[in-house]
Image (cartoon, rainbow, N blue to C red):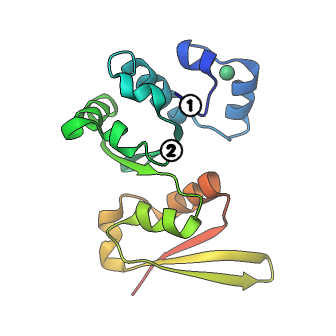
Amino acid sequence: MKAPICENCLQSESLCDQCKQKLDDNIITQKDIEVSRFINTLSQKIKSLKNVTIVKAIDATILTIVCGLGDGPMLVGRNGSVVKVLAKKFKKNIKIIEYYDNFEEFARKLLEPAEITISSVFSPEGQYYKIKIPSQQESNIGFTNQCLEKIFKDVCNKNVKVVFEN
Ligand SMILES: [Zn+2]
């Protein structure tokens, strides 16, 4: 299994200097660590989880786990068995989303089924993306706009402004 922390830190309760530095620099979060370690523990029973990559865990109204391309079905599990365990452990609804290199594709998958509009904006401060989500879908998204903007920054390294409007 691949995770935001190294193999040793997955197995142990403490963090090595390198992983500790990542945490201090906000490259990874406590939630990334918690989720990765828990999935690693599960992988002792559910062998298919040994091959998954955990990219990031985003703790919002819905706990969203970004995984490697093609790893989604393993993290969902047969009849949702793995997400059910995750939901019980973290006491939240779980969303599993595969990571796409293509930022727009990733954004659309993350925000499904909302119909979003993505535009590229050039401002004096530099280029950023504007994602427009219809207001009536705001309550279904499970993420605030600040949270989404942080996800796009942390996962895709893109500057994004998210607006809810029609
Ligand atoms: Zn480590």
Q: Which secondary structure, mark 2?
A: loop
Q: Which secondary structure, mark 1?
A: loop
Please tell me in which quadrant of the rendered image residue 10 appears. top right
Depth order, front residue of 18/60: 18
In the image: residue 95, left or right of residue 129 = left
Q: Give the residue at x 51% y 57%.
A: 147
Of labels 2 and 1, earlier in sequence is 1
Instruction: Indicate the amino acid at tag 1.
Output: Lys
In the image: residue 125, left or right of residue 26 = right
Looking at the image, in which quadrant does ligand 1 appear? top right
Instruction: Indicate the amino acid at tag 2.
Output: Gly
Q: Give the residue at x 23% y 39%.
A: 80
- Please give the label number shown on residue 47: none
Residue 36 in the image: state x and y as whole percent.
49, 29
- The residue identified by callout 1 is 2
- Please give the label number shown on residue 68: 2
For disc 2, the neighbor class at 10 Å (few under 14, some 14 to 19, many from 20) is some
Residue 74 in the image: state x and y as whole percent.
35, 37
